[in-house]
Amino acid sequence: MDLESTIIGVSVSRIEGPEKVTGGTRFAADVILPGMLSGKILRSPHPHARIRRVDVSAARRVPGVKAVVTGPDNPGYYMGKVLRDLPVLCWDRVRYIGDRVAAVAAETPEAAEEALLLIEVEYEVLPAVFDPLEAMRPDAPLLHDDVAAYEGAPLHVLAKDVRNGQTRLAWTKGDVAQGFREADVVLEHSFSVPSRHQGYLEPYASVISIDDDGRVQAWCSSKAPFRARRQLAQAVGLPEEQIRVNVVAVGGDFGGKGDARDLPIAYLLSKMANRPVKIVMSSAEELTASNPTHPTFVTIRSGVTRDGRLTAREVRTVHASGAYGAMKPRAYLSTHHYVGGGYHIPNTSFEFLQVYTNTTPGGYFRAPGAHQYTFALESHTDLLAQELGMDPAEFRRINLLAPGQEDALGRPLRLVNAREVMEAALEAGRWGQPKTGPGHGRGVAIFGRQIGGGIAGAVVTAEADGTFTVISPTVDIGTGTHTIEQQIVASEMNVQPSQVRVRPGDTDSTPYDEGPRASRVTYTEGQAVAKACEQIRQAIADGATLPLTVTFEHEAPEPDDITYFSAQVAEVQVDSETGQVKVLRLVTAHDVGTVINPLAHQGQIDGGVVTGLGLGVTEELVTDGGQVLNGNLGDYKLPTMSDIPPLETVLVHSAGGTGPYDAKAIGELANNATAAAIANAVADAAGCRLFELPITSDRVYAVLKSGRKPEGSD
């Protein structure tokens, strides 16, 4: 019996659901070991200062304190995903408010907190710089003397000629000067987007226990156990095989949990105390000192003909990288996935700069840097249409990419469904129909991205009783990964999903896996599971005896000739007296292939749209002098259920998926056009445009009442 039709495309219940809803799921903070100590970290109160002296004598005398470690006692320890420029504990300089200087392990959290208060640090305060544009000025304080000297420095993209420059990515295509000469209209606009937090509810936790033979056992809130192992090993000078990262559930990620975070500090404390140590970040530490998104400034200059054809484009984007570049997997944002946009432009020049600032080190967010760039690009697109007196949708129709065309970076794309997806969103969004009330407006925006490849694997066992066991190296961060693996194995082996067990494996028991990133998991891990099943079927056909275990590992290529697209239409109402914006409706359309699990697929879309809503209208890390002022979940305004308007999804099916059964990526495609669609709808409703996010009532009110164009326009 062929069961594929009853397994693939069916909303199979999530494997982890019962454990989660009954409270049985174990997260890193739930790990309890005999003799475990509580670790706490002392952080810098200054954005930039020299450390002159650290005195921990009083802290050591606090009853219950078993270990105190400081930067000056442990110099030279750096950590990072690729670029290792982040001190485990600072010994000479601190570079942002929240930089780690010392740590304590004690019998109770209260004793550890008391000891922190007794540590005396003498600082020499230094000049600081918080704005990346100011940080590039010749007279700006220099945060790092020689970036190229750091281990892992990406020498081929270092911004060596830029003051406080970290990395520089650039692409050119055609003859930009000639393209602008061919244009009838040239417009330039500048946009800014503040820092945001990923918004996961589980604070990061780190646990270390050192066995009698020196083997390090680690537990942490990381979606990438193998990468966490590597970062810990590099930071404290251990061979990777001496460390085992034990997998626990991860309570949300959204790009923010791909690192080792405080594991090296927990290791130093555990080694000193000869006891297990657990460090759990507070929500305040998460919001003020972890790895939020990058404050971003985007300037776009485009040339168009009177009939609406784009002839040239220049883009300059500057990201405030924060004090360190350690939290980015490539030491820069992977902007190449999406900056070409959905438009065919013959002549282009792109520059993306990462600049050091005395602010919290920036990290990854779903499609890193994409919501900032898409807000700027799609707002600019509407402004071009407005200048030409064209409908924004019609202007896009003229310039959207078609299959086989080169994108704006010069890459020929084999699979492009931007036009079909946009038309589906426009139809569902009632584009062109009369507005439903005063102050109402509609806006459209599109977003497309390539997906990642990389190393993935699986361990699949055909048991003697006819069931199957999968040990997955990929952490399920809430997307339903393990359920998808269950469905694939059930389909491939022609059994019911209930006959397939999937569990995560630690770094000793599974092949290497890079972890969830770049919307790659169904493509990379799904293929690994399917190919392991193929080997099992062949072995059984050849007479193999059960039980039979196959360990499969592969490196999936990054498909650089495919871009998946999403289009969104927002409908809003703007109160002209108060500037209050109410999002009435959000429509999102997606290019999809075979949807393996419709419920999980829709969950990714709905979650992404709600994330995009927050990025558009509520979320902002407000800072002053490098200090985050709203570092709590009461003041950092994540959207709540009462904020969410009706959501409508349209699925546009087409071939060309890279995953098993022609599946396509969905994870990072629903959150990046939302803010731009809302901004365009507000401009349509109110006749004014904001050039910064979020779109708050006070900003709209200020523009409405100013009687002038907002800053950033021509």
Image: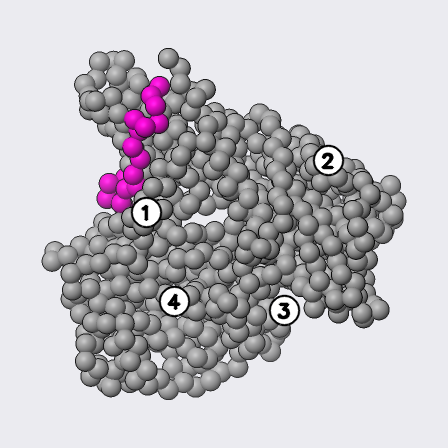
Local secondary structure at mark 3: helix
**Residue 22, disc:** 1
Q: Which residues are magenta?
A: 493-512
Q: Quadrant of the C terminus?
A: bottom right
Mark 4 burial class by Cα count in 10 Å: few <14, some 14-19, many 20+:
some
Mark 3 burial class by Cα count in 10 Å: few <14, some 14-19, many 20+:
some
Task: Note whether 339 is above or below 701 in the view shown.
Answer: above
> Residue at 83% across / 68% down in the picture?
708
- Give the residue pinned by disc 4: 282
Q: Please name which of the two marks, 4 or 1, marks the residue nearer to the observer.
A: 1
- State which tag comes first along the sequence, 4 or 1: 1
> Residue at 77% across / 40% down in the picture?
431
- Asked whether residue 284 appears in the rendered view, the answer is yes
Residue type at mark 3 is Leu
Q: Please name which of the two marks, 4 or 3, marks the residue nearer to the observer.
A: 4
Distance from disc 1 to disc 2, alpha carbons, whole Å, reads: 42 Å
Q: Please name which of the two marks, 3 or 1, marks the residue nearer to the observer.
A: 1
50 vs 141, left or right, is: left
- Asked whether residue 296 appears in the rendered view, the answer is no
- State which tag comes first along the sequence, 4 or 2: 4
- Give the residue pinned by disc 2: 427
Residue type at mark 4 is Ser
**Residue 133, disc:** 3
Please tell me whether residue 506 belongs to the stretch shown in magenta: yes
- State which tag comes first along the sequence, 3 or 1: 1
Residue type at mark 2 is Glu
Residue type at mark 1 is Thr
Mark 1 burial class by Cα count in 10 Å: few <14, some 14-19, many 20+:
few
Local secondary structure at mark 1: loop
- State which tag comes first along the sequence, 1 or 2: 1
The residue at the far left in this view is 212
Distance from disc 2 to disc 3, alpha carbons, whole Å, reads: 42 Å
